[in-house]
Amino acid sequence: MDAQMKKGLLDACVLYILKKEDTYGYKLTQEITGILDTSESALYPVLRRLESQGFLETYSAEYSGRLRKYYRITAKGITRLNEIRNELKELKDLIELIIGGDN
């Protein structure tokens, strides 16, 4: 898949996963790499950007005696996820037109 396309989908994947539940970076990385072929090093800049844009927030919680940083989607992030979903539906329609265009 094209790197630019992957970059756009990464935001959607992060927001989608966090809408289901708060999670920490490593687990989020594992879930995303199961969906989209990307590296852990590509994910953390995305998380920082989404947080600076107000789509995510972080908090720390103790796990096995250590603090773990968790990510949570905000109301603004849910709105952005819905916008992305609408954009993807439009893209899906266009892709279906192009793929089926030889008929």
Image: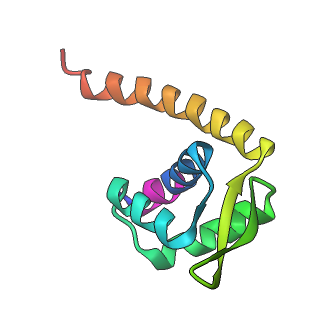
* Residue at position x 41%, y 58% in the image: 31
Q: Nearer the viewer, residue 5 or 22?
A: 22
Percent coordinates x, y for residue 24 in the rendering: 58, 67
Q: Which of 61 and 87 is in front in this view?
A: 61
Q: Can residue 95 be seen in this view?
A: yes
Highlighted range, magenta: 3-8
Q: How many marks?
A: 0
Location of the C terminus (image quadrant): top left
* 78 relative to 62, above or below: above
Percent coordinates x, y for residue 86 in the rendering: 59, 28
Q: Is residue 1 visible?
A: no
Percent coordinates x, y for residue 85 in the rendering: 56, 33
* 28 relative to 40, above or below: above
Q: In this view, does 39 lie to the left or right of 90?
A: left
Predominant secondary structure in magenta? helix
* Residue at position x 74%, y 66% in the image: 58
Q: Residue furthest left?
A: 103
Q: Which residue lies furthest to the bottom in this view?
A: 66
* Residue at position x 77%, y 48% in the image: 74
Q: Which of 86 and 78 is in front in this view?
A: 78
Decide whether residue 12 is among the magenta residues.
no
Percent coordinates x, y for residue 72 in the rendering: 69, 55
